[in-house]
Image (spheres, coloured by chain):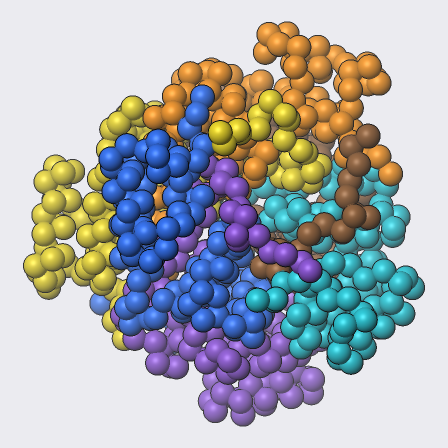
Chain colours: A cyan, B brown, C blue, D purple, E yellow, F orange
Amino acid sequence: MRMQRLIEYEEAGPEVRAVYDDIRATRKTDYINNFWKALANDPANLKRTWESSKQVMGPGVLDSLTKELIYIAVSVTNQCPYCIASHTASAQSRGMTAEMFHEVMAVVGMANETNRLVAGYQVEIDERFKTTHS
Amino acid sequence: MRMQRLIEYEEAGPEVRAVYDDIRATRKTDYINNFWKALANDPANLKRTWESSKQVMGPGVLDSLTKELIYIAVSVTNQCPYCIASHTASAQSRGMTAEMFHEVMAVVGMANETNRLVAGYQVEIDERFKTTHS
Amino acid sequence: MRMQRLIEYEEAGPEVRAVYDDIRATRKTDYINNFWKALANDPANLKRTWESSKQVMGPGVLDSLTKELIYIAVSVTNQCPYCIASHTASAQSRGMTAEMFHEVMAVVGMANETNRLVAGYQVEIDERFKTTHS
Amino acid sequence: MRMQRLIEYEEAGPEVRAVYDDIRATRKTDYINNFWKALANDPANLKRTWESSKQVMGPGVLDSLTKELIYIAVSVTNQCPYCIASHTASAQSRGMTAEMFHEVMAVVGMANETNRLVAGYQVEIDERFKTTHS
Amino acid sequence: MRMQRLIEYEEAGPEVRAVYDDIRATRKTDYINNFWKALANDPANLKRTWESSKQVMGPGVLDSLTKELIYIAVSVTNQCPYCIASHTASAQSRGMTAEMFHEVMAVVGMANETNRLVAGYQVEIDERFKTTHS
Amino acid sequence: MRMQRLIEYEEAGPEVRAVYDDIRATRKTDYINNFWKALANDPANLKRTWESSKQVMGPGVLDSLTKELIYIAVSVTNQCPYCIASHTASAQSRGMTAEMFHEVMAVVGMANETNRLVAGYQVEIDERFKTTHS
């Protein structure tokens, strides 16, 4: 059964084509990543995910580059090779230098280390760090 | 056996005290987080981790606030309550606004979602995203 | 050292052969997945895991297809490429349609997203959702 | 700073109130979970997440109960206590019996176990399970 | 609905009692951990899991203490507070000293760090480390 | 941009060469793993990580082989193919037999399973397993 293959523009229905057109217009490139071509097997999910992506990853109080660095940090923590490769490229196109990448890696490595030290030593939250929900 | 309790300055040996003194001087505060007090059960690991932390989390080509945001992103992905609480406080002290926090959360949520879509659809890395190791 | 290679029926000892025979009889196919051929390096673990698999994955109050969907959800969350590929095939043989797969992916993606929003916002369990252990 | 507290209807702005009203109408209950009250600190994310949730978790080719079981499977794999508690309650309200819950747990446990056996034994994907992207 | 509460010996049926009796005899203690009391809601899973535990965690070519250290390493990586607490106690009863615990924590922290550096730098497996499946 | 490629000794600067020399002297081999060659893109992180590795992975109250087994357990749990391959080789060079490897896999599988059963059944920590931080 075909449910995970890459859907090209030529064979796509109008709902998928509309998303591809918007990706191209938004990103100012003809290129559609494999991720979107795979999601296109489910046009409703493609549309919802692309709309969320535009809303979430676009510049806000944080610039797009910072958001890409955070995205890389999550993808490295989850060990997603595709996501690391594609968002490293995306971050570079937004200005990430090699030095920035190295610093992200060092922080991600250290956070993954200390997250476990906290768990292993069963460290309780300091009173002053507790969130008051009122 | 006592191996995970919090070590206070008064009962600590000279190696631990030296680290506590450096934390206080570096952070310009008398307060020592529970994390360091727990790690102090193993003075060598305390010292190594604190030295790494100073090197990794200090400002470089990325500022300290951006590094804290990345740290939060990892800790949320790993679901470490202590780390989320303490580094949210730390990021706030470095200027993180509520709006910044919300944007970090949205990116972290979306990255965790799309990381799984990539895995489930078995998306292969686009040729153009492949790293050439030469 | 050979400890992770694939063990074929012809070279296997009687304990492994008995499991392979049972897999073939239970699944009504001659084909033995690479997973079982790799586990066969440790005959005791092969036998225990296969017996558990028969007990856990067989139809109960939940049918086998629903169990396969749950299995896929876990494997996607853990990002295990082999498990995703083999259990997607297995689910398809039990009647999973492309539409079902897409819905599973959407739920898995969303759950992974909201799991992190809950962690980041440090949401406390509603009184009404608390389990009473008495 | 208040950025993770629970937002009650009375203090909420119109965008949040509109979502709360829709949650109440859709779920036919006055009760708003803490999750939504926490997300309401970021009205745009609240609205986006709620709209996605309605689209993803509602009945499709899979019924709502099956989707809740899948949601629980992910939340248990990620070890999110809030998500486990709230979606166990949600699944029960949609008809999950204790027997169903036990079977979900057994599958989730087994999948987490075998995911790691696959990784440790470095099992390669069988030719017949490979997805052809064409 | 009662499906996650703790089942005491007095209220348990014969299948659960038989497991509890075996736990007591095997461990030479009257105490039954909450884990087993919770699993007892599903007697078949309780029995299967206990039998596996006896087979897997008992001494083999690795002694019981080494197995407990490995168990702790996994539980810390997965951030399971119950598992960390109960298996730390179990390891201590088998001879784990504070110094051993500290060394386990340091290795677990470092492995979690370097696992991510490997992912982020997309390091390819050295030819000499590749498993030959033949 | 070159930021993830493998740095060979011949093209490396003095800081990287010093680390490579120390790796060779410490490990009594001319071979430098791809991991170190990739980290060498960031000489400061290379040096810090190598120094930590020497301190953490060397023999202490736990021997080097036990530490390698723990490292494998973490890497399998995190599903890091490179780390599994390289540290399996490293453990073998320190005396890990196939039987030891199989036992590690069985424990890692079981711990990953029971970690999730604990989460799903929302098991609370037994009073006797609670750490007293005083």
Task: Give the x, y percent position of residue B58.
Answer: 75, 37
Q: Is residue F23 left or right of residue F68?
A: right
- Location of residue A15 (image quadrant): bottom right
Question: Who's the residue at 43% across and 74% down the image?
Answer: D66
Task: Give the x, y percent position of residue F124.
Answer: 32, 55
Task: Give the x, y percent position of residue D81.
Answer: 44, 61
Q: Is residue B78 left or right of residue A69?
A: left
Q: Between D48 and E101, which is closer to the camera in this rendering?
A: D48
User: Quarter holding the C terminus of chain C?
Assistant: bottom left
Q: Between B9 and F28, which is closer to the camera in this rendering?
A: F28
Task: Give the x, y percent position of residue A121.
Answer: 45, 38
Question: Who's the residue at 49% across and 26% down the image?
Answer: F88
Query: Compared with residue E123, is residue F112 higher up or lower down, i.e. above or below?
Result: below
**Any part of residue E40 in sight:** no
User: Quarter holding the N terminus of chain C?
Assistant: top left
Q: Is residue D22 left or right of residue B13?
A: right
Query: Compared with residue D68, is residue F112 higher up or lower down, i.e. above or below?
Result: above
Question: Who's the residue at 60% across and 56% down the image?
Answer: D131
